[in-house]
Image (tube, grey):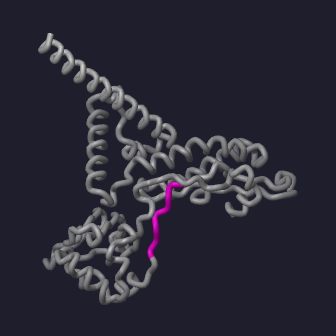
Amino acid sequence: MRKTLHKIEEKSQLFMMKQCPSPSAGLRYKVLTIPPQFPLSEEEKDISISTMTYAIRSNFKEKKKAISLGLLPFKNKNQTRTANIITYPDHQIWQLKTPEEVAKYFDKSFPQIPLEKIILSEEISRFTFSKGGEFPNPQFCSGVYKILGEPDNNQGTAVILLGDAVHCFPPDIGQGVNSALEDIYILQEILEETEDNLSQGLPIYQNKRQDDIKALIRLVQISYPWQYNQDPWQTKLWSVNFFIRLLLSRFLPFMFSPHSFVLIQNHNLSYSEILAKSNRNTTILLTLSSLVIILILFFVGWQIFILYR
């Protein structure tokens, strides 16, 4: 539908997706299905807990061989669990063509857990032949609606784009469903205020969502893009930045806000408000860092001046 609208409004570019870079874009993923309460070792009582998150790291250390099984928690202890495998496209796992090759690879990767009791042969086969998916670039379009004819007079159609049709991105911050539901909620509020007058309500909806959509895409780029261990150094730098902001927000809450990844969990803040707080933190940190550098240079220069005076 969005592509059709783009053809209609090609000159305005309103419905063309604007691509933004991200460290997690282009990563490939597959999903393993795992029993609800699977054994963590050969000990009978060592069973997984459904409400806990698990990250099971492989025995391999090489970049193109190492993987981890990431399992999210579930409230229902009887619900089947899924393990996400996320890697670069040139990882060895994408070169495995048969269930036997995959089973052998998993056995070597995870000798610390009883895989034969966790992953059935049928699941190995399904996993082998599934295509998996690829994380997209964070992207958005400026236009969210198109009115054709006069739908308020029952003489035409209004096309409204919501969710991934307007903004899509990697799952780094877990806001895909949330942002789509927010689109629907805000649209519904505006239609109530305008008594379902589409010609009046849709321009209001578009203007109200544009800033938040742009802020959301930017937050995807900066909040937690290195969580898949793409680059150990970048991951460490992100961790340092995260904890610096977290500590500063604890000890100087009047000056600093928590990291954007923490703020995203606060449903009372809009994406625009979160980005503004994050940008303010960055500005203050850069200003303070610049002052420290200037003071150090001044001190060194003064010492040299005294030494050679």
- Identify which residue, 27 or 298, lies in the foreground: 298
Q: Is the residue 30 above or below the residue 15 in the image?
A: below
The total number of labels drawn is 0
Q: Is residue 295 left or right of residue 179?
A: left
Q: Residue 85: percent from the left, percent from the top?
A: 35, 70
Q: Quadrant of the C terminus?
A: top left
Q: Residue at x 24, y 85 (%)?
A: 116
Instruction: Classify residue 73 by image quadrant.
Output: bottom left
Q: Residue furthest top?
A: 309
- Identify which residue, 192 or 63, lies in the foreground: 63
Q: Residue 41: percent from the left, percent from the top?
A: 16, 76
Q: Residue at x 26, y 52 (%)?
A: 233
Instruction: Classify residue 257 by image quadrant.
Output: top left
Q: Residue at x 70, y 47 (%)?
A: 191
Q: Is the residue 303 above or below the residue 61 in the image?
A: above
- Residue 135 forms part of the magenta stretch: yes
- Identify which residue, 196 or 241, lies in the foreground: 241
The magenta-colored residue range is 132-139
Q: Residue 284: percent from the left, percent from the top?
A: 37, 28
Q: Residue 63: percent from the left, percent from the top?
A: 27, 67
Q: Is residue 179 left or right of residue 85?
A: right
- Residue 138 forms part of the magenta stretch: yes
Magenta span main SS: loop
Q: Residue at x 35, y 27 (%)?
A: 287
Q: Is residue 260 left or right of residue 147?
A: left
Q: Is the residue 99 above or below the residue 39 in the image?
A: below
